[in-house]
Every structure is written in structure tokens, then in C-alpha cells.
Image (cartoon, rainbow, N blue to C red):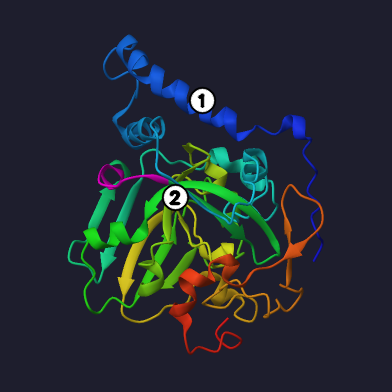
């Protein structure tokens, strides 16, 4: 496999976090004034934009923030949003940035079904209305042996699932992403069997670290990063963190996830970050942090072992990779 060499971004071109914070303060001060200066209904010009208006208003306030990456420096906004895997747009790392404008996120709805008491399809603004947003700074590790540190904004997946009342038969949680081959060029190729599907055990899904993210760096989630809502599971390889989610189903029997179905020897169901289990084509013992030179040692469970290792007690993690 050819290795993509990502260009080093000069420090002068990287937006410092302080600037994002100052923008947030500016928005807090100017949001009410701006709304008053615009005729009712014009600030968010169509009803379908309600989720984005609600989200931007929330992001303009002080959100609770948790640093959960061991004090490591966050990856720049530019590096986060220009180096991605999002095969719905193509297999190149910059394809999501280049073609992300084709993703139509307005309006957006989320279907929740299966082994729940309250199933249905819900407008994203209604989903967001009942959630308290927070910022969480997590490590992000790709199975391709590169990594980032990302300040996500979102809410625990468990909070959403509890609202819908999982039944005692709910053993797994299945996620499905948008399927729109007319606009998403990657879905016109048989990279995987579209739409993309991911699966977690119910205890993994309900773990406090598992996040549904709707933003990063205090901004609405960019299209290339999984807008408008995506999963973040920080102790697993990035392919488990499905983007642009449209459906969540709670089921009793475990279905295959997309990459597990496509190539089970390379993409196991658990996908826990484990430096002792190599990918068939490269070592997982070390990783390349995007925006930095050199490599660093990979941490077991991506550094979240204290929080999640108990989920896999007694399991052979060489066999269940």
C-alpha cells in the first residue's frame, strides 16, 4: 500500500485554540444582537435549518470541557479537517475535504428502532433539544497507524439510548450512515456494501466515554468529519466511529459490520486499539501523530485502559481483535 505523505503545515498557518475561544466569546456577545437585527425567520431562513441554528446557539455558550487525552496537545483544526478517511467521498485522504460539500445535511433525521420502547424517526433538532452538550478532548487512533487529538463536542450515546428505553433483549447497537450515491461519489464504487454499518456491544455503547459528536473545536461538525452527527469511541480504531449517522437499531443478535464483512482478517469486530496485535500489513506498536514528525508508541486501548479494560475481562484479545 502506498503511503500518503501529509505535508507539514507551517506553524504560522495553524489557527491557535485561543482564536477559536475568542470567536466563541464574540458569538456569545453578538448572537442576541444579530437576531434582533434580522427579521423573524430570516436568521435561520428555512425551517429545515432548525438543527443547525439550535446547535450554533449552543456552541456560542460556555460548554463543560473535559481534557481526556493525557494533557497532549490538540491537533490543529486544519489537520483534523484535511486528512480523513470518509470513503463515501472517495479513498483519498483529501477527498472528504474536496467533495464534502456534496453531503446534504439539511434537513436531517435519526431513526431509532429495534429493541426499544420508544422507536421512531426524529428530526435532529428534536434529538439535540433534549441533550446537554459538552466538549471532550480525546485521542483518535486509526487502524492505518496514524493518530490525532481532537476536541469533540457532543453528548454521551447512553443519554440518547436511555431516553428510548432499551429492552432486556438489546445486546448490540447497530449504526448506519447516509446512503446517497447521487451526491456521494464514493458510494458509486463497491468499496464496501453500502450503506456503511457499524456495531457495538450494548455495554460498549452505554459506556460513559462513548460519544455522539456534533461538532469539533467549538464549531458545527464539518461535512468531511462526519456531519451532522457521528459516533466517537476513543478506545477503538477510528473505523468504528461511524460518520453521518441516520439510523440506530438495538438488536439481540450481532450482525456483521461493514469492514468486518469486507475483510475480517484486517478489521475485527472489537477493533480495540492494541499495540500487540499487528495489522496483517503493518505493525500497530507505533503510530504517526498527524502534524508531528516521527512516531510514538501506541497505547493499549488508546490510553483508556483504566476506564474500559474491564469490558473485556477474561477475553483473549489476540483472538477477539
Direction top: furthest residue: 37
Q: Residue at x 52, y 25 (%)?
A: 22
Residue 250 appears in which quarter of the rendering? bottom left
Q: Please provide percent x and percent y for residue 283.
A: 75, 74
Q: Secondary structure at mark 1?
A: helix
- Labelled pair 2, 1 in contact (Cβ < 8 Å): no
Please determine whether, in this image, residue 233 is positioned above or below residue 311. above
Q: In this image, 36 relative to 137: left or right?
A: left
Q: Secondary structure at mark 2?
A: strand
Q: Is residue 40 magenta?
A: no
Please determine whether, in this image, residue 197 is positioned above or below residue 181. below
Write down the residue under mark 1: 23
Q: Residue at x 64, y 62 (%)?
A: 142
305 or 56, which is in the foreground? 305
Which image quarter is the C terminus in?
bottom right
| Residue 150 visible from this viewpoint | yes
Cα–Cα span, label 2 and label 1 = 20 Å
Q: For the residues carrying marks 2 and 1, which lies nearer the camera in this image? A: 1
Q: Is residue 127 magenta?
A: yes
Which image quarter is the N terminus in?
bottom right
Residue 213's label in the rendered image is: 2
Q: Please provide percent x and percent y for residue 203.
A: 37, 74
Q: Which residues are magenta?
A: 126-134
Q: Residue at x 26, y 16 (%)?
A: 40
Amino acid at each position: 500500500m502506498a503511503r500518503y505523505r501529509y505535508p507539514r503545515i507551517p506553524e504560522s498557518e495553524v489557527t491557535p485554540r485561543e482564536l477559536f475561544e475568542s470567536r466563541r466569546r464574540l458569538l456569545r456577545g453578538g448572537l442576541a444582537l444579530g437576531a434582533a437585527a434580522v427579521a423573524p425567520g430570516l436568521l435561520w431562513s428555512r425551517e429545515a435549518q432548525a438543527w443547525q441554528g439550535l446547535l450554533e446557539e449552543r456552541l456560542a455558550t460556555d460548554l463543560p470541557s473535559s481534557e481526556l487525552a493525557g494533557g497532549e496537545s490538540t491537533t490543529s483544526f486544519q489537520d483534523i479537517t484535511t486528512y480523513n478517511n470518509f470513503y463515501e467521498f472517495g479513498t483519498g485522504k483529501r477527498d472528504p475535504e474536496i467533495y464534502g460539500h456534496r453531503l446534504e445535511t439539511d434537513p436531517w433525521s435519526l431513526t431509532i428502532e429495534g429493541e426499544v420502547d420508544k422507536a421512531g424517526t426524529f428530526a435532529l433538532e428534536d434529538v439535540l433539544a433534549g441533550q446537554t452538550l459538552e466538549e471532550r478532548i480525546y485521542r483518535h487512533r486509526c487502524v492505518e497507524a496514524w493518530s490525532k487529538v481532537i476536541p469533540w463536542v457532543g453528548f454521551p450515546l447512553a443519554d440518547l439510548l436511555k431516553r428510548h428505553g432499551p429492552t432486556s433483549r438489546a445486546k448490540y447497537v447497530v449504526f448506519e450512515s447516509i446512503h446517497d450515491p447521487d451526491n456521494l461519489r464514493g458510494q458509486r464504487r463497491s468499496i464496501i456494501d453500502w450503506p456503511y454499518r457499524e456495531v457495538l456491544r450494548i455495554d460498549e455503547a452505554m459506556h460513559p466515554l462513548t460519544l455522539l459528536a456534533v461538532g469539533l473545536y467549538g464549531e458545527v461538525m464539518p461535512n468531511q468529519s462526519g456531519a451532522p452527527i457521528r459516533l466517537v469511541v476513543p478506545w477503538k480504531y477510528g473505523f468504528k466511529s461511524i460518520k453521518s449517522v441516520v439510523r440506530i437499531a438495538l438488536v439481540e443478535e450481532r450482525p456483521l459490520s461493514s469492514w468486518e464483512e469486507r475483510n475480517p482478517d484486517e478489521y475485527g469486530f472489537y477493533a480495540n486499539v492494541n499495540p500487540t496485535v499487528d495489522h496483517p500489513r503493518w505493525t500497530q506498536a507505533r503510530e504517526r501523530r498527524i502534524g508531528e514528525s516521527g512516531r510514538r508508541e501506541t497505547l493499549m486501548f488508546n490510553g483508556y485502559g483504566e476506564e474500559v479494560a474491564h469490558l473485556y475481562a477474561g477475553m483473549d484479545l489476540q483472538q477477539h481483535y
